[in-house]
Amino acid sequence: MKNSRTSSTPHDDRPALFAALFAAVLLCALLSMCLGAVAIPPGEVLSALLEAPQGATAQIVRYARLPRTCGCLLAGAALAVSGGVIQSVLGNPLAAPNIIGVSSGAGFGVALFGALAPTMAAASPAAAFAGALLGMLLVLTIAERTGASKLTLVLAGAAVSGMFSAGIDAVVTFVPDALNGYSDFRIGGLANLAMSRIVPAFWIVLAAMALIFSLAGDLDVLLLGADTAQSLGLRAKPLRLALLALAAALAGAAVSFSGLLGFVGLIVPHIMRRLIGEESRPLLAGCALGGAAILTLCDLLARLLFAPYELPVGIVLSLAGGPFFIWLLLRQRGGRSHDRAA
Amino acid sequence: MIELHDLSAGYGGRDVIHGISLSFPPGRVLALLGPNGCGKSTLLRTALGLGPSSGGQVSIDGVPLEALSLRDRAKKAAYLPQSRAVPNITARRMVLHGRFPHLSYPRRYRQEDHAAVDRALELADASGVAHRHMGELSGGQRQKVYLAMALAQDAPTILMDEPTTFLDIGHQLEVMALARRLAQDGRSVVMVLHDLCLAMRWADDIALLSGGRLAAHGTAEQVYASGELDRTFGIALRRMETDSGWQYYYG
């Protein structure tokens, strides 16, 4: 059977691709640890991590670079996988966490929680998840009521995102301390992170990822269309809802410490679909690696471009991601297979 | 065996099929014929519970459809829908999805699943394209892959909605021959067909739908003799005896 391969497909070079992605993640993480306002050689980074922290260099590595790098890897992976799941489940290439109201909902959750219970920062990922889920359900309900087309989904997302953004602004107007670093949060930024804010989000991301990957086979069957899926014994509705809730948990966890980062969840799944194909398990694994690498790289650029001044990473992402996305749209023109299914 | 008792169904409060009683006996190929829009697809979908019924009942092996879980239904009957998605995955992966009802969470494919997939690919004559992506295949090749997916499901009943569309005449005959082989293995095969002559030549039984009602049902011979086909389609169906049995034509 193996001899019948007649053309080179993404399937054939998958191991090499994953090795390359993995290497890219490691390289980005290493550069992120070493470079910045102060360049630190890899050897010193290592010794600062392994030995007791002494001196300014070790302080920078442990309390600035390490949380920042971990935050980038985690948020990038979570947002990209969330976007990949949302696009697949909705069969809509225009969907992504920041487009269908998940991110702004999560942001509103974080802001409101920050205003009401400023001392319980560890629980803010849970608030983000609740907000993300609320935003997503609102958008899906509105889109379904108005015809469930790809466009109404995006329009409903824009409307709901606008409302949640106004909500965030209102909360911050009344309680200025609800979000530490308000403009960073709005644009998306990972400066001044502490490990204590990443750890609760990490557990949520880990659990949600594990569940999503265990459902990858079911997701593949869902992609065959509602009739085929049901005739194969799949209960489509509960699965859709479960997957979207998990995607909301991922995006919410990321937003809880990184703010409203756009584009990672939209662009990375598109790139990975082209490189890997649509089989869910490898696709989502590729999203996780690619998202981690790209966000870390963008954050590095944000630090280095105007050093010693820093840009919020959201600005770099949008400046790099926007044109790239337009290029993708122009290049693609013809429909992809998953454009067709409603 | 799937049995329909006085089944009615439709969309948006309007019935498309009315009071149909029909069974799909094992070991036989049943062709579902009728003009466009007469409810053939609705009949298949309702028989599997993919769409709601507005009256009557469906039972599988004597058990009411509602009493069976989706997974149990999938083990009893495979379904090849009329419109088929083309995900960007390999053909083999596609056929592997046919094993879905036989796995429980978290769905790890076992050795026997891969063996079933190989058998199904072989039967549907799709082994040659197993490692190619669905998007690269021709309409006919995709059709065979979908057919293989339904076969991999290993269900005693197979319902196919227009399995011969996109296929040239040679491949249409292959599909009909495959249907016959499946019936000889003791499965019940139901297919919606548009080519009357193909259906009359190859199917054991014919069910003719007209305006959502069962206009005729019986062996090909009986339905031909009833003259209902001529009335329903507004044609004059004739036949001629050849060395390989009756051949049908119309004028």
Image (tube, grey):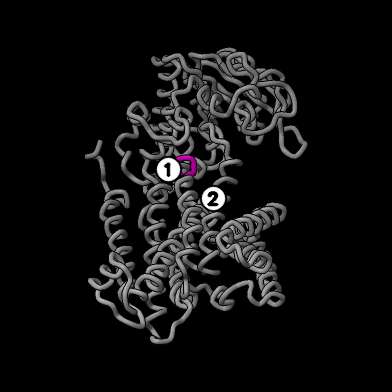
Q: Which residue is mark 1?
A: B139
The residue nearer to you, when weighing B125 against A196, is: A196
- The answer to whether marks 1 and 2 sit on the same chain is no
Q: Residue at x 40, y 31 (%)?
A: B148
> In the rendered view, would you say B40 is above or below B23?
below
Q: Position of residue B171 (x, y in %)?
A: 39, 32
The residue nearer to you, when weighing B176 against A331, is: A331
User: Is residue A217 rendered magenta in the image?
Assistant: yes
Classify the position of the N terminus of chain A by image quarter.
top left
Q: Is residue B105 left or right of residue B230?
A: left
> In the rendered view, would you say B20 is above or below B160?
above
- Answer whether labels 1 and 2 touch (C-beta < 8 Å): no
Q: Is residue A305 left or right of residue B247?
A: left
Q: Which residues are magenta?
A: A216-220
Q: Is residue B30 visible?
A: yes
Describe the element under mark 1 as helix, strand or loop: helix
The residue nearer to you, when weighing A286 against A271, is: A286
Q: Which residue is mark 2?
A: A246
